Amino acid sequence: MKPGQRNLITDVAGLRVGNAMDAGIKTGVSVLLADAPFTAGVHVMGGAPGTRETDLLAPDKTVEQVDALVLSGGSAFGLDAASGVADGLRSMGRGFEVGGMTVPIVPGAILFDLINGGDKAWTENPYKALGRAALDAATEDFALGTVGAGTGAVTAQLKGGLGSASVVLPGGITVGALVAVNALGSAIVGDGPEFWAAPWEVEAEFGGLGAARSYPDPHLPVTKRGAHRNTTIGIVATDASLTQAQCTRLATAAHDGYARALVPSHTPMDGDLIFAAATGAQPLTDPVADSLLIGHAAAICMARAVARGVFAATAAPGDPFPTWAARFG
């Protein structure tokens, strides 16, 4: 199987991604939206999450579709990014109709990037404006690395970043992933340069180095200095027709991608979270078998996206960690 045309989450037809960032603050926002509302789910496995509207995504809740998903830097301040997105969607006439009012449904999640060398002495929370700017920038083609929610991200040894990947399954269903990699753990094996995600790499998309030739003691993982600078947040998406419960299972399965690409992952100091989105364009021919295949593909896409985000990161003044490219060429 091969990636879609772009090897991005936007290979799922109808999806767009917008990124906005502030280089001085070293932070940013990424927004996923579609041509129409889409079914969504979420699963949280980290011990320190920061979220908005995730309770709404439980399978027993009334509203089953959302208008956008937001990934943001800024810790709790970054939750305001979804407000900017909601304002923009309302001006477009997008949202859930309630008694003649239009209410955009915009779940979001944040990562901690407040001590990454950027200037955080703002007088007004910048994230609402960044959210609106990211919405306005939404397109099918977008850059990876030091952009959007990955602008200020770091891992145990290297600068993190925004990653994405996709795959087209034999029956024509497309699966994609988008992730802002800001992990307590490491994306590379030992001192590198090989990625933990190497067994799932496609077409040398993050250097083509293959698997590491030796491995450190797995019981002694490399972790980031400072225990609260973390959280990897992401989205997996498909054009398959899934219920909210099936989206929840998809998000759950996709967490395997974190575990394959980041060691350790899902720690008490990470708020690791994955949203799942389904546009519903492709019906399932076998709900059980298709769901299994889509979940497995989502986990692989997520692992690849994590490595691609770290691989594509670019340097900026004051960075606390080097980029993969600067360290390994």
Image (cartoon, rainbow, N blue to C red):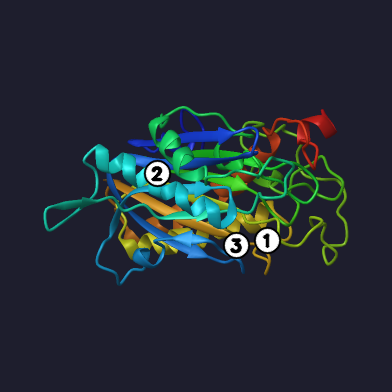
Q: Amino acid at mark 1?
A: Ser
Task: Determine which residue is flagged by label 2.
Answer: 84
**Distance (Cα) linking label 1 and label 3:** 10 Å
Task: Determine which residue is flagged by label 1.
Answer: 265
In the image shown, does 185 or 320 lie closer to the viewer?
320
Question: Which residue is found at the position 36% from the left and 68% from the top?
Answer: 58
Q: Is residue 169 visible?
A: no
> Which quarter of the rendering shows the C terminus?
top right
In the image shown, does 131 or 18 lie closer to the viewer?
131
Sequence-wise, the earlier of marks 2 and 1 is: 2
Task: Determine which residue is flagged by label 3.
Answer: 271
- Residue 202 placement: quadrant: top right
Q: For numbered disc 3, what is the local secondary structure?
A: loop
Question: Which residue is found at the position 76% from the left and 52% from the top?
Answer: 186
Q: For numbered disc 2, what is the local secondary structure?
A: helix
- Residue 133 placement: quadrant: top left
Q: Amino acid at mark 2?
A: Gly
Question: Which residue is found at the position 50% from the left and 39% from the top?
Answer: 166
Sequence-wise, the earlier of marks 3 and 2 is: 2
Q: Nearer the viewer, mark 2 or mark 1?
A: 2
Q: Is residue 285 left or right of residue 211?
A: left
Q: Is residue 111 above or below residue 22?
A: below
**Distance (Cα) linking label 3 and label 2:** 23 Å
The crowding category of the residue bearing disc 1, from other C-alpha atoms within 10 Å (few below 14, some 14 to 19, many at least 20), is many
